[in-house]
Amino acid sequence: MALPKGRQSKARGRKRRTHYKTASVSTSLCPQCSQQKMPHRACPNCGYYRGRPILSATE
């Protein structure tokens, strides 16, 4: 197994990790209230998921 000849600096390691970025959160429109929500989750605005009320509506 190969061994490194010397220690890499913190800057060199961080330069390599510049491409390790998290993807932005995708959103979709709620069919009930047309507000932005995360897919496959109950709407935080109206509380519906797949046409059924799941959460109590916040007012």
Image (cartoon, grey):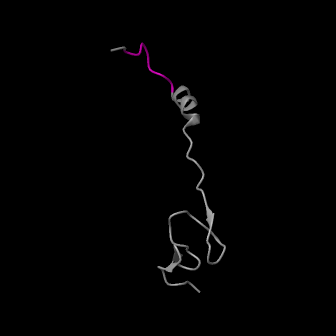
Tell me which residue sits at (50%, 67%) in the image. Answer: 41
Between 2 and 24, the residue placed more toward the observer is 24
Whether residue 13 sits left or right of residue 34 in the image: it is left
Tell me which residue sits at (53%, 77%) in the image. Answer: 51
Rendering quarter of residue 44:
bottom right
Between 31 and 5, the residue placed more toward the observer is 31
Between 6 and 31, the residue placed more toward the observer is 31
Q: Main secondary structure of the magenta part?
A: loop
Q: Position of residue 58 (x, y in %)?
A: 56, 84
Q: Position of residue 8 (x, y in %)?
A: 48, 22
> Would you say residue 5 sits in the magenta stretch?
yes
Q: Position of residue 13 (x, y in %)?
A: 51, 28
Tell me which residue sits at (53%, 78%) in the image. Answer: 47
The count of marks equals 0
- Report the span colored magenta: 3-9
Quadrant (top left, top right, bottom left, bottom right) of the C terminus: bottom right
Rendering quarter of residue 21:
top right
Extreme residue in the right direction? 34
